[in-house]
Amino acid sequence: MTEFDLDRPVPLHPLVFLEDGDEVTIGRADVDSYGIFPGEGAALVRRLVDGDTPREAAAWFEREYGEEVDVEDVLAGLEELDLIRGTGEVAVEKAPVRFSDLGKALFSPFAWVVYAALTLWGLSAMVFNADLRPTYHNIFFSDYYMVIQVGLFLAAIPLLFLHESFHALAGRRLGVRSRLRIGRRLYFIVLETSLDGLVAVPRRQRYLPIVAGLLADVLGIAACTVAADLTRHPDGSLSGLGRFLLAVAFAALLRVIWQFFLYLRTDIYVLVSTVLGCVDLHGAAIQIFRNRLRRLFGRPETDEELLHPVDRKVGRWYSWLVVVGYTASLTTFVLAGAPVLYRFVTGVIGRLTGDGVPTAQLLDSIVFGAVALAQCAVLGWLMVRERVKARRDRRLHHVIH
């Protein structure tokens, strides 16, 4: 740890302060590094920003609040968050965020009118046309599994990027930077938009960036449904393109339903934890559940008092939801996913090793197997990456008392 001169002002980077109840988020918007401070701690940091030396700030704190403060501990926390400038380091102001104007246009009043009109058009089409309503039969728009798998996979790519783009642009219109990355939720491979800077935005302004991806999904479903209706054959039956679009719409609907599996830390989970004022609800819930197991087997527990108070309170009931959710997902995979996977694997192997297999079926099996292996390889890579990352010191949330 750096030795600080308590009689010299601390060279701090330009900082942002966001009050939220009894707590204040302080950090650097240029690198998205933030910490949560109690109100009196934030007041101390403000004194340092105003030019007080650490000793002067500590003396002011004692006069103001009637208690001593370990100012060196506070400085160590600020250093860990990279809020203190190093020797020769120049203070960097936050650079303008690209595409912020596009984000403002995408969520302008006119855009909301367009979104509402498209959604109502899609809903009315489903109401008045039974063949446009979502059903699992829509998935089977072709007799070839290869065509279904590859078709839906390729169609999902632009819809997934649309989902993440809505997240990113909803945040960028507020000046929040974003990064797109590949992640994992249990055995699901997911795209994630990182919006760390939202912690420095008033809570009510965070809601739209969080749910913007769901808005994109709903618009995608509505657009596919309307397009399927408009591309009918002259006799009124659905065209091949229409059947494919309905399959894409149904797959998108499944992704919307998946968002309500809170235990997988979906968009709805982030929304709920933000509304409740949580910091790391999932991590707290896991720790609380592990402590229950430790008590059961007579092992020492980890200190739950170090958790954020709201996380600790909500995590006591949310931890059971996590356990039930993971159990349901794993049970579903064992009872339904594994048998289906076994049938696909044995079918592919049978076709590849059998005699007299038609060329179309052989090609179908090769492509299906290649795509499945690629998905397994990506999932394995993500699991290894998480293990390596877990072994390093990670800066997630810093709560300074």
Image (cartoon, grey):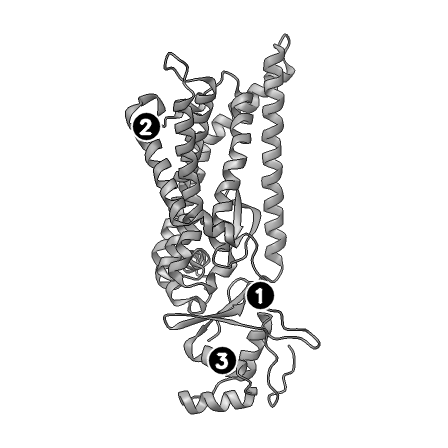
Disc 1, SS: loop
- Residue 125, compared with residue 320, is above or below; it is above
Residue 178 in the image, given as x and y percentages of width and height: 54, 54
Which image quarter is the N terminus in?
bottom right
Amino acid type of the residue that numbered disc 1 sits on in the rendered structure: Lys
Which residue is identified by label 2? 126
- Residue 101, compared with residue 367, is above or below; it is below
Distance Cα–Cα, label 1 vs label 2: 47 Å
Residue 188 appears anywhere in the view: no
- Residue 349, compared with residue 80, is above or below; it is above
Taking the image as shown, residue 326 lies to the left or right of residue 189, namely left
Q: How crowded is the residue under tag 2: few (<14 C-alpha within 10 Å), some, or many (20+)?
A: some
- Residue 258, compared with residue 284, is above or below; it is above
Amino acid type of the residue that numbered disc 3 sits on in the rendered structure: Arg
Disc 2, SS: helix
Furthest residue to the left? Answer: 128
Which of 120/321 is in front? 120
Amino acid type of the residue that numbered disc 2 sits on in the rendered structure: Met
Question: Residue 46 has which mark?
Answer: 3
Taking the image as shown, residue 4 lies to the left or right of residue 232, namely right
Which residue is located at x 53 percent, y 21 percent?
145
Residue 360 in the image, given as x and y percentages of width and height: 60, 13
Distance Cα–Cα, label 3 vs label 2: 57 Å
Answer with mark 3 or mark 2, whichever residue precedes in sequence. 3
Which residue is located at x 62 percent, y 88 percent?
8
Which residue is located at x 53 percent, y 69 percent?
27
Which residue is identified by label 1? 94
Disc 3, SS: helix
Furthest residue to the front? Answer: 110
